[in-house]
Image (cartoon, rainbow, N blue to C red):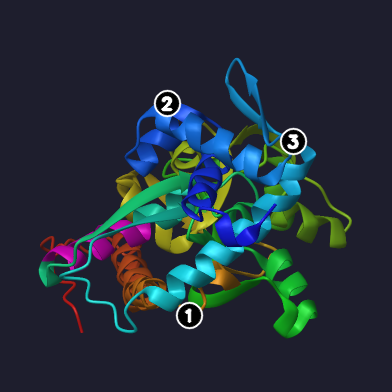
Amino acid sequence: MNFRTLDLNLLRVFDAVMAEGNITRAAERLAMTQPAVSNALKRLKESLGEELLTRMPSGVKPTAFAEVLWPLVRDSLGHLQQALEPTQHDPQAQARVYRLAMVDAVAALLMPPLMARFQASGARAQIEIHPLVNRDPRDVLARGDVDFALGHFPETIAALASQGNQAPVRHRRLSENRFVCAMRRDHPLAQAPLTLDAFCAADHVLVSFSGRAHGFVDQALASLERTRRIVLTVNQFFTAALTVVHTDLLTVLPDGFLPVTGLDDRLVTRELPLSPGSVFVDALWHVRNERSSQHRWLLNEMAAVAQRTVETAAQAHARSRAGTDAPFKDPYRSTVPT
């Protein structure tokens, strides 16, 4: 292969097809026709002298060579984009689609005030929310499937800290909350402080993004040589909250999440009789985006609303638990750019 004669546009096509795993979707992403994408892949294959993709009923499957090549191409394209984009991002003039991975609790807390902030400032940003399927988003960030992953990632952040400056993923803390036990208001355990024995004897709903029926609370219980009985495992906090409204099950949720469920008047919370630690919302991104002014802008926007949103939700929940009825004031509409 002669690198000097290689059409670099072919690498953009290759990157899109690898990311989508499908030629039709890649064509839509690139605003090209499907035959044009297929032709570009054929030309790249001829230039490299290597097979890149195998057609499958559901799309395309990369060869071993393509799997090795793709991370190098993606990083190189990312660095080139950073070098060519403006040093200062103008959100009112420059449109951009951002892909964020997060769970429903984080989305419910952050997205309403963030979008209200965008509308108030005239920012042209568009947000796509992608599901978070486990507690380690490094793979999806490395592949470029999303721009940021937001959530509680203690083990991942510990692993990144051990790598120091060589870590391929960066992170920033946005907010801190705490776990509480939630149950319906007329639950038998709602009449008194929750004891460890009562907590372990009850049936539980667990929120697990991977589907594994073992979480942070279970780790904390194991350190006390105790266990609990999990009868339902779900992948959304809202589903867990709605389930305990109608049953005698218990669930553990971030305290600040309950007010945005719309179920706050039907639930009560109790302090956990153990300490699973705080729940953090951290933003993670790949190092290739470290110098991107667009990514820095969105990160700062998310940080600006995160702490205020958690505090507002916690205050609303405290008023609800105290039985205080106050006129509703939308905290999102009052969120203005700083």
The residue pinned by badge 3 equals 63
User: Marks 1 and 3: CB-CB under 8 Å?
Assistant: no
Numbered circle sitting on residue 35: 2
215 magenta-colored: no
Q: Is residue 311 left or right of residue 37?
A: left
**Can you give x and y, in whole percent of width and height, for residue 189 in the image?**
56, 47
User: Looking at the figure, which quarter contains the C terminus?
Assistant: bottom left
Q: Nearer the viewer, mark 1 or mark 3?
A: 3
Q: Residue at x 35, y 30 (%)?
A: 33
Q: Main secondary structure of the magenta part?
A: helix
Tell me the number on the disc at residue 291.
1
Q: Quadrant of residue 184?
A: top left
Q: Nearer the viewer, mark 3 or mark 2?
A: 2
Residue 289 at x, y = what percent? 50, 71
Residue sitting nearer the eye, 302 or 3: 3
Q: Label 1 amino acid?
A: Arg
